[in-house]
Image (cartoon, rainbow, N blue to C red):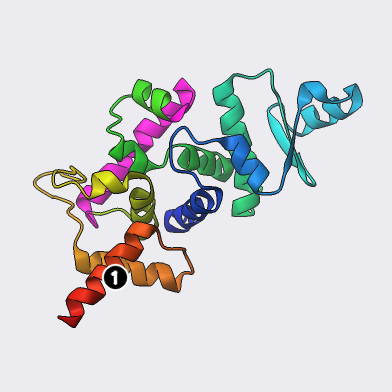
Amino acid sequence: MDFVKLYEIIFKIYTDCGVTAFPIDCFDIVRKRGYQIQKYSELSQKKRKACLCLSPDSCIVKDTLYYQDQNTAERIRFSIMHELGHVFLQTSVEEMADTFSSHILAPRIAIHKSRCHTAQQIHDTFALSYTASNKALQDYKVWYENIAHTTRMPSPPEKQLELLLFSEKCNMPEAEDRFTDDNIVYTPDPIIIYQDIQRALMAGLPLTEEYKRLLKQYRKMRSL
């Protein structure tokens, strides 16, 4: 999966739907994407049976998202985002939809910035099930190691997401937004941030207010 593209999609959803805190409001995102919502328990026996044949958890038919309201809240959230994953990624591959759901509910950069070191902390912060939290934790460790040993920094859309959700922490002198391993340290560089802004503009991504401020600041520095 192209994770840069995945996070471009996630960042756009967050900005379009006004997501600024965790756990995210899945039903609000569904509504803002133009879908109606119905519980399986509210359907006629015939329609409920048809939905259950499509999925025991949730399904999208035309302009309506149907979901099994007898499931746990965590499972409902994951299955709803799973269905949107099929839509946003334009795929029928279940594994890709699961990946989308896990990352939009608990972006790996957000796990890092929230200082989640256990599955319990991920569960409490992002409202994932314990099974999904454990998988997200293992994936976060791989994500962290990859950054520490390669680019030393998140992808451009992940950093935009970081600024959108954690702008106050990003501006603190001791922000601790570092990825360290064997003395490898991630520290955002103004020039690199400006390059990321340029790439974001070329990709058609909206800039956060923080990125707009940094762009203005950088241009001012260049004019001195």
Left/right of residue 190 with respect to residue 112 in the rendered view:
left
The residue lying at 58 percent from left, 43 percent from top is 97
- In screen coordinates, is 213 left or right of 177? right
Q: Residues within 10 Å of mark 1 (few under 14, many from 20)?
A: few
Above or below, 217 against 35 in this view is below
Which of the 4 quarters of the picture holds residue 175? top left
**Residue 164 image position (x, y, % from top left):** 38, 50
Question: Which quadrant of the structure image shows residue 83?
Answer: top right
Question: Can residue 52 be seen in this snapshot?
Answer: yes
Q: Is residue 91 visible?
A: no
Q: Amino acid at mark 1?
A: Lys
Q: Nearer the viewer, residue 105 or 56?
A: 105
Residue 112 falls left or right of residue 129: left
- Which part of the image, by quadrant, shows the C terminus? bottom left
Q: Position of residue 208 (x, y in %)?
A: 40, 58
**Residue 99 higher or lower than 15, as above or below:** above
User: Which residue: 58% across, 22% down?
Assistant: 73
Residue carrying label 1: 216
Magenta residues, as a range? 126-152
* Residue located 59% across and 53% down the image: 89
Question: Magenta part mainly helix, strand or loop?
Answer: helix
